[in-house]
């Protein structure tokens, strides 16, 4: 294929602005799927990630489209659509020359529109603004275009107006891709350099590697090398997704495809690596990506200890297809044998958790999630990376305790600015700036400790703005803070799984809230149960659960229900989620009390 007629692009958008629908519509209008398949995909709204469309089949699809008698190959590279996956967005974008920036004609520019647009602009991509859903009965097209100009600095005259659902204006999208996005510019005669931008595990074929060729070409039967590893592999199968896997014999400059080499483990193929020919090696690798850093950790324990191996198998299965999720065995006094699991963020954690609930028949106890901390210990050169409060050294050993800081961007109605600013101030936020997008909407930027936003910031924002506010965050580094480990003692015994890391100024308030919450969650026993929060040996809060008396039925507690809690409620009934700790029975809910006791 002559690279002159190849175009590589992504679609980026805030969630629900129509990315999947537009992708499907492009597939439909280029003949890759039928009208019936398009309709079916529109109806299928059940999948957990709600990423229907091309994502069901592949992360990159080659479309063929004719313009003025010339056939073009348009490679649509999919990007994940949520905040937790920033790194993956940028790495998908690195395989493209352009991006369609989709904006809902009523909702306008939202937090993730901005984040995605910046990622594309930083990656030197040609950005084509597309206003979608122009068929809606009420739209704000002119205001939306103004927002695109004010906040993103893009020329509104360049914007296309479409209805992905009805197909209106989609032809103009094809034309803009061909006219405005540059053709790939690599050298066909140079040694092969292909960028690995994704990989997935197939139980029959092993690892399927997605690549985009920068220089040279690749043929079936070639001996190739992943430049990070030393191993040489034969190209067993080569092809493109259209959207089904279609094998071919050769791919050249600018083209996007997949390769099967017989590699069996996902861990052996590194996203961001460069593929070259074993016999004719490229001198330098392509610039790769930073490894995504796991920022949120939690413990997962089987309720029934005999399920430990089963849980391990299920976690292994999940990690096969998701290299950014990790797990390692750990033991806890209270919970026995389980796993410490690492995630990119809270959404990532929820997705994995839901998969486990759905696919694995294992009753789970999950501990409250925590972020990753850095500790500079006395007399130590190396900085400790702490992903479990249990590992925090004694206070006397700590020179510096550092926590991750995120830059948080809110887009919200101007009338709610005060409320959200107060919320951020209460959570140790540092105000950065406010920008107005129009008469009624603004962008507010704060720097906040990651620990203060991951649990319920999103819920709080939604309720404060009646659903009109959106947020996005990016971790910008670690900063020293006056942090301490707070322990919980139940009937005098330390329950490690309930330890948390808190700011000293908030410790007492949190401690009181937490023991109060625990008092509600743990039912009465035949004896008195003391609940204490402590920093080191100093008790900072205390509650007592009185002993059970005759004729007293257990109290029933209501209380507010957060997103996390609802998720728990949904988990399979019938399994009694309790752990016996000493003489005291602690229910699963209690382990998540930490989330609510702020
Ligand atoms: P994504 O989250 O960006 O992938 O968004 P989806 O493609 O899943 O679309 C979100 C919702 O918007 C779905 O209910 C779609 O049917 C709807 N939608 C997408 N495009 C249009 C459009 O052009 N017009 C209207 N009225 N609805 C649309
Ligand atoms: Mg989608």
Image (cartoon, rainbow, N blue to C red):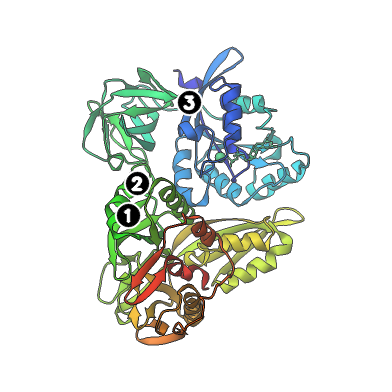
Residue for point 59% across, 58% down:
409
- Where's residue 571, x and y in %? 47, 55
Is 243 situated above or below 132?
above
Q: Residues within 10 Å of mark 2 (few under 14, many from 20)?
A: some
Q: Nearer the viewer, residue 479 or 163?
A: 163
Q: Earlier in the sequence, mark 2 or mark 1?
A: 2
Does the residue at mark 3 contact the one at mark 2 (Cβ under 8 Å)?
no
Would you name the residue on which mark 1 appears?
327
Task: Find residue 319 and name its label.
Answer: 2
Q: Nearer the viewer, residue 397 or 343?
A: 343
Residue 217 can be seen in this image? no
- Per the image, label 1 sits on a secondary structure element best described as strand
Q: Left or right: where does residue 378 sit relative to residue 14?
A: left
Figure quarter occupied by ligand 2: top right
Would you name the residue on which mark 3 appears?
243
Q: Quadrant of the N terminus?
A: top left
């Amino acid at each position: 294929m002559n690279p002159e007629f190849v175009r590589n692009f992504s679609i980026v958008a805030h969630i629900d602005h129509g990315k999947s629908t537009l992708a499907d519509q492009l597939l439909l209008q280029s003949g890759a799927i039928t009208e019936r398949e398009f309709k079916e995909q529109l109806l299928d709204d059940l999948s957990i990630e709600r990423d229907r469309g091309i994502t069901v089949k592949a992360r990159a699809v080659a479309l063929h489209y004719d313009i003025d008698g010339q056939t073009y190959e348009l490679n649509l590279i999919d990007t994940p659509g949520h905040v937790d996956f920033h790194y993956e967005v940028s790495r998908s974008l690195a395989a493209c020359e352009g991006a369609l920036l989709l904006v809902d004609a009523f909702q306008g520019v939202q937090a993730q529109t901005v984040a995605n647009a910046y990622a594309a602009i930083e990656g030197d991509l040609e950005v084509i603004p597309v206003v979608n859903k122009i068929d809606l009965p009420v739209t704000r097209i002119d205001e939306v275009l103004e927002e695109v100009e004010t906040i993103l600095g893009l020329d509104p005259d360049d914007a296309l107006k479409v209805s992905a659902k009805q197909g209106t204006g989609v032809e103009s999208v094809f034309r803009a891709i061909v006219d405005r996005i540059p053709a790939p510019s690599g050298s066909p005669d140079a040694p092969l350099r292909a960028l690995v931008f994704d990989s997935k595990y197939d139980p029959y074929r092993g690892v399927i590697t997605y690549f985009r060729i920068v220089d040279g070409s690749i043929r079936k039967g070639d001996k190739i090398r992943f430049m990070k590893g030393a191993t040489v592999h034969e190209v067993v199968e080569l092809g493109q997704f259209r959207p089904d896997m279609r094998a071919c014999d050769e791919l050249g400059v600018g083209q996007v495809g997949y390769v099967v080499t017989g590699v069996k483990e996902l861990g052996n193929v590194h996203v961001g690596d460069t593929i070259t020919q074993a016999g004719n090696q490229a001198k330098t690798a392509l610039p790769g990506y930073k490894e995504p850093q796991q920022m949120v950790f939690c413990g997962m324990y089987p309720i029934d200890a005999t399920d430990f191996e089963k849980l391990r198998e299920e976690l292994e299965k999940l990690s096969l297809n998701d290299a950014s999720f990790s797990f390692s065995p750990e033991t806890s006094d209270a919970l026995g044998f389980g796993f410490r699991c690492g995630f990119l963020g809270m959404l990532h954690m929820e997705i994995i958790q839901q998969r486990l609930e759905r696919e694995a028949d294992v009753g789970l106890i999950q501990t409250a999630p925590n972020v990753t901390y850095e500790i500079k210990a006395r007399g130590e050169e190396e900085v400790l990376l702490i992903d479990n409060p249990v590992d925090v050294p004694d206070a006397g050993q700590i020179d510096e305790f550092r926590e991750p800081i995120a830059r948080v961007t809110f887009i919200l109605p101007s009338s709610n600015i005060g409320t959200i600013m107060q919320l951020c101030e209460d959570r140790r936020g540092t105000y950065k700036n406010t920008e107005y997008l129009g008469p009624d909407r603004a962008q507010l930027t704060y720097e906040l400790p990651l620990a203060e936003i991951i649990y319920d910031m999103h819920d709080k924002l939604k309720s404060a703005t009646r659903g009109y506010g959106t947020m996005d965050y990016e971790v910008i580094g670690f900063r020293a803070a006056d942090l301490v480990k707070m322990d919980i003692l139940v009937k005098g015994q330390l329950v490690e799984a309930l330890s948390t890391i808190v700011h000293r100024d908030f410790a007492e308030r949190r401690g009181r809230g937490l023991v109060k919450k625990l008092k509600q969650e743990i039912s009465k026993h035949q004896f008195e149960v003391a609940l204490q929060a402590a920093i080191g040996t100093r008790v900072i809060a205390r509650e007592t659960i009185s002993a059970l008396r005759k004729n007293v039925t257990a109290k029933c507690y209501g209380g507010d229900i957060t997103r996390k809690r609802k998720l728990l409620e949904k988990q399979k009934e019938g399994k009694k989620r309790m752990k016996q700790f000493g003489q005291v029975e602690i229910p699963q809910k209690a382990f998540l009390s930490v989330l609510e006791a702020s």
